[in-house]
């Protein structure tokens, strides 16, 4: 480990999800999401990434015909500092019967404990989309259900389902997420039936519960795939949706019944029943 690493802090006034999609596409590493932006850390130089974010921001403003305030700060930090700050920042969280805690903390008696080492993958239970998905898992996943976690991130949602007795598959287009989900599953003494790098359409199983905590635009692109892999009468948990894009997403799922919406802050998780 080098003594110093490069840190690129990006703050955006709007369209957080579009910037997140852009970074997911261009970055070979993971990044931290904050309330108003992103933090990218690497021992490699980040000048090219900085330039790319600037160019994307300019292009997005032209395409949308509206201003977006963008603040980008590139600094050098001590490696030991960010590891300590990161561990101090990831604290345990309790959601319904689930108790999610980082691997350096202790489990809690009387709860369904889930140990998560988020590493470079999204999903610690703190973000509203993960929290509301966990509420949906607690309510809709039953023992022996077949569940798929599409865009599994840290694996937290499928691990929660397996803790309730479900059989789970998972997939993610990010190989780091797939590996991290496997590690977290082992940490929690559960095992995926199948987990792969790639899209949901790569499998040929139909599921009782399909979970997809991604972003609104992707949920519209893969709507047919998600419906295809969900059993008739099965449940679909769709999240990663800013409430202003809720109706946009629902247009692609008009043949499904909306049975519940779980809002938190400006985010919403939609619970649909497959026709």
Image (cartoon, grey):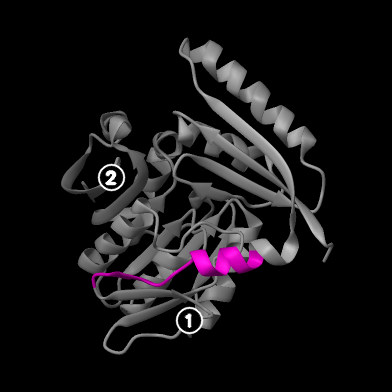
Considering depth in this image, is 230 or 244 the residue closer to the camera? 244
x, y (%) of residue 33?
52, 48
Q: Earlier in the sequence, mark 1 or mark 2?
A: 1
Asked if the residue at tag 2 contacts the one at tag 1, i.e. Cβ–Cβ closer than 8 Å, the answer is: no
- Please determine whether, in this image, residue 139 is positioned above or below residue 50: below
What residue span does the magenta drawing correspond to? Answer: 83-96
**Residue under numbered circle 2:** 265
Where, by quadrant of the figure, is residue 166 drawn? bottom left
How far is disc 1 from disc 2 in space, using C-alphas? Answer: 27 Å
Q: Is residue 65 left or right of residue 76?
A: left
**Residue under numbered circle 1:** 105
Q: Is residue 192 left or right of residue 26?
A: left
Check disc 2 and report its element: helix, strand or loop: loop
Tell me the quarter of the image containing the N terminus: bottom right
Badge 1: how crowded within 10 Å, few (<14), some, or many (20+)? Answer: some
Considering depth in this image, is 48 or 211 the residue closer to the camera? 48
Which residue is pictured at 42% across the width and 44% down the height? 225
Which residue is pictured at 34% across the width and 85% down the height? 108
Which residue is pictured at 59% across the width and 50% down the height? 173
x, y (%) of residue 245?
32, 31
Check disc 1 and report its element: helix, strand or loop: loop
- Please determine whether, in this image, residue 133 is positioned above or below residue 67: below
């Amino acid at each position: 480990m080098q003594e110093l690493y490069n840190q690129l802090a990006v703050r955006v006034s709007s369209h957080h999800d579009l910037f997140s999609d852009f970074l997911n596409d261009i970055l070979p590493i993971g990044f931290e999401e904050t309330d108003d932006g992103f933090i990218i850390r690497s021992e490699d130089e980040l000048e090219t990434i900085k330039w790319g974010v600037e160019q994307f921001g300019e292009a997005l403003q032209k395409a949308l015909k509206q201003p977006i305030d963008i603040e980008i700060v590139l600094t050098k930090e001590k490696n030991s500092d960010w590891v300590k700050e990161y561990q101090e920042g990831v604290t345990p969280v309790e959601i319904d019967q689930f108790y999610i805690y980082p691997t350096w903390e202790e489990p809690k008696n009387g709860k369904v404990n889930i140990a998560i080492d988020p590493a470079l993958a999204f999903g610690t239970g703190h973000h509203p989309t993960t929290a509301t998905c966990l509420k949906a898992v607690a309510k809709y996943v039953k023992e022996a259900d077949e569940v798929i976690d599409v865009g599994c991130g840290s694996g937290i949602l499928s691990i929660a389902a397996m803790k309730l007795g479900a059989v789970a598959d998972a997939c993610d287009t990010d190989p780091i997420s797939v590996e991290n989900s496997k590690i977290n599953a082992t940490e929690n003494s559960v095992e995926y039936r199948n987990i792969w790098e790639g899209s949901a359409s790569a499998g040929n199983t139909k599921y009782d519960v399909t979970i997809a905590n991604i972003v609104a635009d992707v949920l519209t692109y893969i709507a047919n795939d998600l419906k295809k892999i969900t059993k008739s009468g099965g449940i679909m948990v769709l999240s990663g949706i800013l409430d202003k894009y809720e109706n946009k997403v629902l247009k692609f799922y008009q043949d499904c019944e909306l049975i519940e919406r779980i809002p938190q802050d400006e985010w919403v998780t939609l619970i649909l029943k497959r026709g």
